[in-house]
Amino acid sequence: MTTKRITRDALLTAIALTIFMVEAQLPALAPVPGMKLGLANIVTVWALFTLGPLDALMILLGRILLGAVFAGQLMALIYSLAGGLLCFLVTLLLRRVLTARQIFIAGIFGAMAHNTGQLIAATLVLKSLAVWYYCPLLLLSGIVTGAFTGLAAQYLHARLAKSGSS
Amino acid sequence: MKTKHFLAVIALIALACLGALIVLRLRSAGVIANIYQDGTCIRSVDLSKVAAPETFTVTDKNGHENVVSVEPGRICVARANCPDQVCVHEGWVSGGTRPIVCLPAKLVIRLEDKSAAPGADAPDAVVG
Ligand SMILES: [Zn+2]
């Protein structure tokens, strides 16, 4: 790993963490456990498509671990990890078949995977299937928020590719 | 794969979710409110037999507190010391399949057909 690469990934982790922490301060969108915008995923999706899986995974894990430390909630780490890793896996698989103009699709499926991962984690924590009542609502909100974050990542990818920097 | 194929799949998922949403909203559940903590039912209240409003506190060993309010036919978490307050914002639940969930306290309140409290055949036995 070159110094340039470490510095760049650290900067991206800091950006993702900042977005994550700001979003955590916003009031909940709806009285639904786990529903949120997931804006920090813009960085993960962009990094996955532009820099590759290893950098994206390190930025994601760095953001999740530091986010849990800064938020002071260790329990939230379980949900973040379950959602973040399932989202990462789905985005990684889609990367093989998607072009640069279809990145928003990865955002949509990634967000749905994220919310599904959180439901699985919540099921294990609560030892109850009750949270699956929110599954349709969480998938629908995932489509909307995922399209937004995916499009943001897609435009970022296009702009930075054009300006020749990454 | 073309973009429109992906969009068709997404549209199908969205339609299925909308259908499920409507079914879940319309379906009615029982009138027995079962309160689960960490997966086990610790109390159950027959909402059809609640005469006067009542409040009780559910605590766990980690210091979580959920103040549950019961009125004839409905139940809610009135106050809680969890950071997200999602359980409080869920408000009153009556008759439907919507659960009240407090993730930090591992608390679930569901309306069901019969009491899930241990050794309680008749829900009357554990009311109040
Ligand atoms: Zn709560």
Image: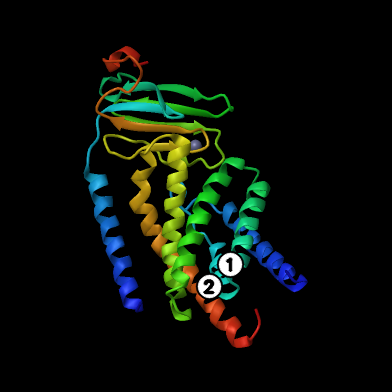
Amino acid type at image mark 1: Val
* Quadrant of the image containing the N terminus of chain A: bottom right
* Secondary structure of residue under mark 1: helix
- The residue labelled by disc 2 is A153
The subunit letter for the residue under badge 2 reads: A
On the question of residue A109 being in view, the answer is yes
In the image, taking residue B117 as reference, residue A40 lies left or right, namely right
Amino acid type at image mark 2: Ala
The numbered dot on residue A131 is: none
On the question of residue B88 being in view, the answer is no
Among the 4 quarters of the image, the one containing residue A123: top left
User: Which residue is nearer to you in this view: B68 or A140?
Assistant: A140
Q: Residues within 10 Å of mark 1 (few under 14, many from 20)?
A: many
- Above/below status of A68 relative to A10: above
Q: Position of residue A107 (x, y in %)?
A: 46, 67
Discs 1, 2: same chain: yes
Q: Position of residue A72 (x, y in %)?
A: 65, 43
User: Which residue sits furthest top?
Assistant: B125
Q: Position of residue B62 (x, y in %)?
A: 58, 28
- Above/below status of B43 relative to B101: above
- Above/below status of A4 relative to A75: below
Q: Residues within 10 Å of mark 2 (few under 14, many from 20)?
A: many
User: Which residue is nearer to you in this view: A120 or B121?
Assistant: A120
- The residue labelled by disc 1 is A43
In the image, taking residue A69 as reference, residue B84 lies left or right, namely left
Precedes in sequence: disc 1 or disc 2: 1
Labels 1 & 2 near each other (Cβ < 8 A) = yes
Q: Position of residue A42 (x, y in %)?
A: 54, 67
* Total number of numbered discs in the rendering: 2
Q: Which residue appears at 26% of the width and 34% of the height?
A: B95
